[in-house]
Image (cartoon, rainbow, N blue to C red):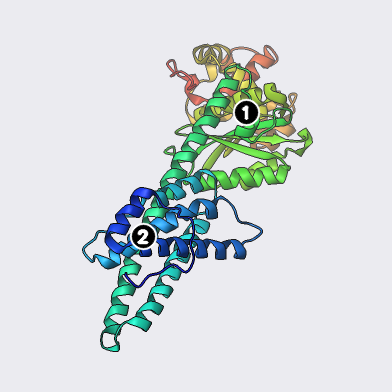
Amino acid sequence: MTALRASRKVAPASSPALRAWAAERVGQDAVEWAAEVTVAVLEALVVRRSSQSGPTEVAGARGCEECTLVALVGLADEGLTIVTPEAALDDARVAARADIALERLLRVAWGCHAEVQERLLTLVQSSVPPAVMMREVRYLVSRLTACIDQYISDISNAYAEEQRETEGRLLAGRRRVVDAVLNGAPAPEGSERVLGLRWTDHHVAAVGWSSAGNRALHTEDNAQRFARQVARAFGGSSLIVERGDHVEFHWSLPRPESFDPGVVRRERPGGMRLAVGFVAPGMRGFVASTRAARSARSIGLRMGHPPDVVEYDEVSVLALASSDWGQAGEFVRREIGGLIGDDPGSASIRDTLCQFLISGRSRQVAAAATHVAPTTVAYRVRRAEEMLGRSSTTRVQETILALQLAHAFPELLEERSSPLPA
């Protein structure tokens, strides 16, 4: 290393302690040479990215120079274990927190490596006897390659670890803000920036979970992609809150008419069930839509044969009627006690009677809805009245609601039914 000489004096970026350590092993001239190489590399990167130079290049100076010093010492001492300097790892952590692409940071590392290798090869060619030149070149390239491999691996790992921690802090912060608002607290200052939503917009919430019952989605990427696609279609923004076995989606819309349930159904990832709230304005709308989506999910989890997408507007009556699960069961058994058989025949009679009453006692409409002949509808309605012990013209609304509850939640027909999940 005695042949290394800096052609100009530059301010060092590495720590005094590391420079002193390196100077003892490879000499002060080599330490100054490393500082010059670092400046040359960063100047070249700034010129190449003159319109985009930023924190990565500035923060990379110390890490680049210290990596170069360790490499020089590693060349002089073949037994030295190469350890990536902490400054280079700090650069990676800063880049991750600032959301700077890892590729920009690695470009600095590769730039330093290429510049150091090129200069040292030039020096070897001009100062090493031909008889040993090939051996020296092989050693030089092999040792520098080991250094850069170690650096790239450690820098990438540090970046990824910091990115995970940063994302975890961000997600936790978002979850805290959402929970506070849902619990009635005023929105904290800066909450719009944290969530990426505007409280003054219209809001709609949804809850997604796995149809297999083991996870909200197959991968987090599916959830992110789904949320972005829906937001793009609505011309709004999106937010995801992880809840363990399910995921909450929140969309902020500039106009209420922007919302189209068909988009949610079309973009829904395979293997995912969805419960969707309603569109409502402001922070109160955010809270109301979230509660509606959660209620719709509870209904979907209870249904014997739930659809892939449960819209609150379609199950709102069921949600209200089943909010007290025990009372709902008592109501069903009291209103349609004669029809509570769990056999296919009883189920057909219940469904036919329900469609008949909903249609305003139209046999034709009920027949089309149940895919049977009008005469079959008439027979089943007559049979239902016999089993109920009363005319179907009495307590019509109560009968319809009890039949709808029994269809959605067959277990309500049983004497004992477990509580509705929260």
Residue matched to label 1: 191
Does dot 1 land on a helix, a strand or a loop? Answer: helix
Between 113 and 245, the one lying in front of the other is: 113
Q: Is residue 266 left or right of residue 77?
A: right
Disc assigned to residue 228: none
User: How far across and how far down the image is residue 152, in percent?
Assistant: 40, 59
User: How far across and how far down the image is residue 268, in percent?
Assistant: 59, 45
Does dot 2 land on a helix, a strand or a loop? Answer: helix
User: How far across and how far down the image is residue 15, in percent?
Assistant: 39, 49
> Residue at coordinates 57% horizontally, 30% vertically from top-left?
348
Q: How many marks?
A: 2
| Above or below: residue 245 compared with residue 136 | above
Label 1 amino acid? Answer: Ser
**Inter-mark Cα distance, 1 to 2:** 45 Å
Can residue 148 be seen? no
Between 49 and 156, the one lying in front of the other is: 49
| Above or below: residue 369 compared with residue 289 | below
Residue matched to label 2: 69
Query: Do callouts 1 and 2 mark residues in contact (Cβ within 8 Å)?
Result: no
Label 2 amino acid? Answer: Leu
Can residue 399 be seen? yes
Q: In this view, does 32 lie to the left or right of 287?
A: left
Between 264 and 32, the one lying in front of the other is: 32
> Residue at coordinates 35% horizontally, 61% vertically from top-left?
28
